[in-house]
Image: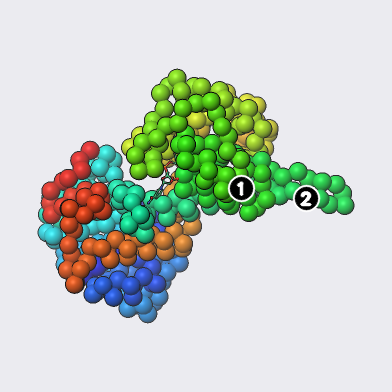
Amino acid sequence: MKLFVPAETREGERRVALVPDTVGKLAALGLEISIQSGAGESAYASDADYEAAGAVIIAASDVDAQLAIADIVPTVRPLDPDHASKLKAGAVALSFLQPANDTENINAIAAAGASALSFDLVPRISRAQSMDALTSQALVTGYRAALVGADRLPKFFPLFMTAAGTIPPAKVLVLGAGVAGLQAIATAKRLGAVVSAYDVRAASADEVRSMGAAFIELDLEALEAGGGYAKEMTEDRAARQRELLTPYITESDVLITTAAVPGRQAPRLVTAQMLEGMSVGSVIVDLAAETGGNVEGSVPGEEVIVNGVQIWGGRDVASQMPVHASRLYAMNVVAILGLAVKDGELKLDPEDDVFDGCAVVLNGEIRKGA
Ligand code: NAD
């Protein structure tokens, strides 16, 4: 069976679904591996590195022909409709893919009679943890958020006791303590900041404390859906949460927001009015900027200054650390293919919870529409 990795086509995407280190792991499943020339360049993996690992390099002019014979096509972003239309019947495309937002890509894969597995929909069961690319990429974004905060803040993170006097540590507040939030907490702690956090899920309190941060208890009911995810807030609760969080926001030097509810716009946690009390030079890192923003005024991919407060809006944040983001993603690809490829054959069993969850299209049939 042939696995082919075309270059990512979305502007700003620097990750790649295959790294040289995972070529051998995929070959061990009985796959012949090929990759488009230059596909790993922005993740610092050269054609020579892939070749040395045993992959065949495909020129850009031969991509369509390669797509037409490939059995498995992993990418980070969904295969674009033009590429998808070249897939052979029975092939499987593997990427992040959202039924609500990627309808053209999904229709093109279905029209080709192929299948599409989405990392957005891998169920959060322990057996599938090694395949959970949402988690692996959230780890990267949380780490990066803390570093951006430390870099932009015109102050130290750690406490310094010097001959010239004592400098107090920076105060970092993290809103949304899921995978990204916990990693932001861990990284800010390592840099010496005093960290506190809030999340709507009751279970997050212990997770936050286990990272050495303070959990902010608010007099509000917890909001939990299944699978470790949060539920959407009502507007009343949102207003009350904003009111109760304002004093904590006002006194923080760095605010990192990561709150998300699957399939919904990011919850608005912070309004422009709430920023008025923050000190000039304080920093906000909004990891939810691309999905509507946790913070009013944040712009994806831009840094804006409102009343002297710097607001960094995240865009393609995992792509900003393409080497390890790609490596983790590629390991997720290896793990899911380890389940899908048996005795040199591709078997996407819809009775298996993993494929039942993440197979958006199965042999041309759309199973998870918008
Ligand atoms: P996510 O990206 O969907 O959301 C980020 C965080 O925002 C979540 O913790 C959520 O509770 C929080 N949030 C939502 N609305 C909020 C609001 N109004 N105010 C404050 N916070 C709000 O979540 P995620 O990081 O992907 O995962 C959440 C949890 O799922 C993890 O902490 C973990 O416990 C669990 N998880 C389990 C597995 C597994 O079992 N395989 C894998 C990954 C994560």
Residue 343 falls left or right of residue 127: left
Residue 315 or residue 225, whichever sits in front: 225
Front of the two marks 1 and 2: 1
| Rendered location of residue 45, percent (x, y) | 42, 69
Q: Hey, which quadrant is residue 309 in on the image? A: top right
| Rendered location of residue 160, percent (x, y) | 77, 50
Q: Quadrant of ligand 1?
A: top left
Q: Is residue 275 above or below residue 125?
A: above
Q: Hey, which quadrant is residue 149 in on the image? A: top right
Dot 1 and dot 2 residues touching (CB under 8 Å)? no
Q: Is residue 45 above or below residue 142?
A: below
Q: Is residue 159 above or below residue 254?
A: below
> Is ligand 1 closer than 8 angstroms to the Cβ of mark 2?
no
Look at 39% across and 77% down and name the residue there. 48
Residue designated by label 2 = 160
Residue 5 falls left or right of residue 71: right
Can residue 302 be seen in this snapshot? Answer: no
Could you tell which of marks 1 and 2 lies nearer the N-terminus?
2
Residue 86 or residue 117, whichever sits in front: 117
Q: Quick one: label 1, few (<14), some, or many (20+) residues within 10 Å?
A: some
Look at 59% across and 27% down and name the residue there. 246
Look at 27% across and 57% down and name the residue there. 94
Look at 39% across and 30% down and name the residue there. 232
Q: Residue furthest right?
A: 163
Can residue 22 be seen in this snapshot? Answer: yes
Secondary structure, mark 2, is strand
Secondary structure, mark 1, is loop
| Rendered location of residue 312, percent (x, y) | 54, 41
Residue designated by label 1 = 212
Residue 95 falls left or right of residue 177: left
Numbered circle sitting on residue 7 = none
